[in-house]
Image: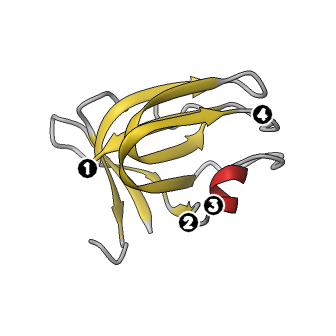
């Protein structure tokens, strides 16, 4: 599975070639905590049943990350969070966590698509 960025200008860029899903309550609570690093081509995706305010914290996360909040695959917010201290929230039905710098060109209104999923 890949995470593909489609900006409003129509070009596409692959942001991650390895995508994991936090698909249980435990994996959602753990997120990237206690990991020492993640590969440059990695994304961790959190899918929720509905659009609600979703929080992301950096407690016990040892490296900076980019976080993207999505509603129906459309970017709502993009933030770089610092290790240990970061905390942000926004409305989303999906959150994607990426290595810091990966989402530098991602803007609200762009689309992020999980390509190769069962829902494609």
- Give the mark nearest the N terminus, 2 or 1: 2
Which is more foreground, mark 1 or mark 3? 3
- Residue for point 49% across, 46% down: 96
Residue 7: % across, % down: 24, 37
Report the residue marked by disc 3: 25
Q: Are marks 2 and 1 in contact (CB under 8 Å)?
A: no
Direction from residue 88 to residue 31 in the image, left or right: right
Report the residue marked by disc 4: 59
Report the residue marked by disc 1: 72
Query: Whole-Å distance between the Cαs marked 2 and 4?
Result: 20 Å
Query: Whole-Å distance between the Cαs marked 2 and 3?
Result: 7 Å
- Give the mark nearest the N terminus, 3 or 4: 3
- Residue for point 59% across, 35% down: 56
Find residue 23 and report its image quarter: bottom right
Residue 104 seen anywhere in this rendered image of the structure:
no
Query: Whole-Å distance between the Cαs marked 3 and 4?
Result: 17 Å
Q: Return the residue found at the far left.
A: 9
Relative depth, front residue between 103 and 96: 96
Q: Are marks 2 and 3 in contact (CB under 8 Å)?
A: no
Query: Whole-Å distance between the Cαs marked 1 and 3?
Result: 21 Å
| Secondary structure under the numbered disc 3 in the rendered image | helix
| Secondary structure under the numbered disc 2 in the rendered image | loop
Direction from residue 82 to residue 107 in the image, left or right: left
Relative depth, front residue between 105 and 58: 58
């Amino acid at each position: 599975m890949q995470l593909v960025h489609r900006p409003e200008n129509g070009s596409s860029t692959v942001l991650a070639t390895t995508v994991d899903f936090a698909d249980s309550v435990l994996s959602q609570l753990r997120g990237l905590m206690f990991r020492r690093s993640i590969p440059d081509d990695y994304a961790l995706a959190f899918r929720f049943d509905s659009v609600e305010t979703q929080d992301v914290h950096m407690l016990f996360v040892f490296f900076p990350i980019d976080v993207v909040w999505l509603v129906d695959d459309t970017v709502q917010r993009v933030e770089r969070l610092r290790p240990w201290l970061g905390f942000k929230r926004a409305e989303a039905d999906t959150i994607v966590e990426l290595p810091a710098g990966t989402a530098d060109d991602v803007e609200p209104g762009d689309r992020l698509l999980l390509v190769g999923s069962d829902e494609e």
